[in-house]
Image (tube, helix red, strand yellow):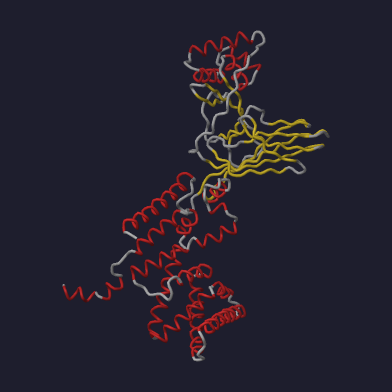
Amino acid sequence: MPRTSFYVLVGVLLAVGLAMTLHRHLVMEVPLLPGEEREVWEVEAVVTFQAQGDPVKASLAIPASPPGFRLLTESTASTGYGLNYLDEEGGRRAQWTKRRATGTQQLYYAAQFLVAPGDPPPPPIPPRPPRTVVWESPLGAAAKEVLDQARQRSADPLSLARELASRLADPGDDENVQLLAKRFDAPDLLVRLLHQAGISARTVEGLRLRDSRRRQSTETWVTVHDAEAGRLLINPRDGSTGRPEDLLLWGTGHAPLLEVEGGKDSRVLYSMIQRSIPASSAMQDQLREESLLDFSIHSLPLGEQALFKNILLIPVGALMVVLLRILVGIQTSGTFMPVLIALAFMQTTLTTGLIAFVLIVGTGLLIRNYLSRLNLLLVARVSAVIITVILIISLYSLLAYRLGVNQGLVITFFPTIILSWTIERMSILWEEEGAWEVLIQGSGSLLTAVLAYLAMSEPLVRHLSFNFLGVQLILMAVVLLLGSYTGYRLSELHRFRHLGEERG
């Protein structure tokens, strides 16, 4: 392959790998570092009412994507009730149904919200035209006077809404506002005045988030819609505008917050708790709902995820082998045997794994030396070595168990075939090159396995390899670049260092 094509391939792998990694981090908010935490609110709504022995249909407005928050999970508990999630005009609802119910009924809805102030706001709910307002005398004249004064101090629909909210929150000596406030509560009065002015407005329910609070109720806010000026959220009790960070808009549709048919004295109360959870957990909850185009290991069943968590570490060990063999010049017994031994170390811990490896290979070499005197065919000899390794592992496991050394039982995690083939290769090497070469390659294999184990067990490496598939492409690009290296290895520079000294 021409060198230009090779470097283009490497460049493409690096670019795609980096793009995938950045997309996962910036768009899907997967943290680059392990241990990052995100703020999550768990909110439980409890609906209670008195059923009267008739068919029951209870409907509660539930949030879908409230501004500043992201819905992670939701669940319900309602014994004997059927449940449906309905997407109605302007919002979602949870509807419980039952053929017949009597006495006090309790229905539960729980949701987990991730604090996400950077998320784009949800699309606005289409407003309804302002309705015709009918006032009783003398309320009509008072309302007209309040509107006229507010118009003089405003320039557009939103500024008129602010002015009205400010006057209702602090009426002072304004007798007209005081008269209207005696007949209507603040949210309804503000909406009526805005409708009389020809401005679309409606009430919405918001929940103030307070950690570890129980039996909380929602607050009624007012949203104002104008085709040109946009939307405005108003707190009619104090005249403030804009959504506070601790306000979770719960019911934003046109329907009431709670509707119950077949029951009376209905109400809904909320409990809430704030938690900090690992960002990876929040991300996993979120990714379960992603589409098929968002390739992610997290969409697999947990058993397969656990399997891939170790498989995705193999390229890291392979890169370590390539670095040590090509750049440093360390000799190993087999090309990637150290990677498999490093994987076994991750199951056994490093110290126990080293002791077990030396015991198995050392005993196996002694037995293999006896087998070589029998002049067996290769297949039979290798098979005998495999059976020998299994017997050695069984013997050491039983011995460790009888001695009460439970840590010794982890010896079973070592790959039998790889150990057998390692013993066979070392034995042949001993016969052809001598014990010194066996010691060099055996030590090199163990050193490489230990370094690969340290790299693969690093929390940052495990986090990146599991959560960012683009890292695998980056590793491949680096391996390809290392594969094209034709210079001296570090061991060769050390070996020929005297030539440089003589020239100097």
Vertical position of residue 262 compared to residue 34: above or below: above
Q: Is residue 181 left or right of residue 19?
A: right
Q: What residue is drawn where x is 55% and y is 47%? A: 292
The front one of 383 and 243 is 383
Q: Which quadrant of the figure contains the C terminus? A: bottom left
Q: Position of residue 80 (x, y in %)?
A: 77, 43
Q: Is residue 303 left or right of residue 456?
A: right
Pick out the residue farthest to the right: 53
Pick out the residue farthest to the left: 504
Q: Which quadrant of the figure contains the N terminus? A: bottom left
Q: What residue is drawn where x is 55% and y is 72%? A: 413
Vertical position of residue 177 compared to residue 436: above or below: above
Q: What residue is drawn where x is 44% and y is 81%? A: 426
Pick out the residue farthest to the bottom: 373
The front one of 241 and 294 is 294
Q: Is residue 142 left or right of residue 33?
A: right
Q: Position of residue 246 (x, y in %)?
A: 54, 36
Q: Where is residue 140 in the image (x, y as percent from the top left)?
A: 62, 9
Q: Using the rendered view, name the quadrant where residue 263 is placed.
A: top right
Q: Where is residue 136 in the image (x, y as percent from the top left)?
A: 67, 10
Vertical position of residue 222 compared to residue 379: above or below: above
Vertical position of residue 291 compared to residue 467: above or below: above
Label count reads: 0
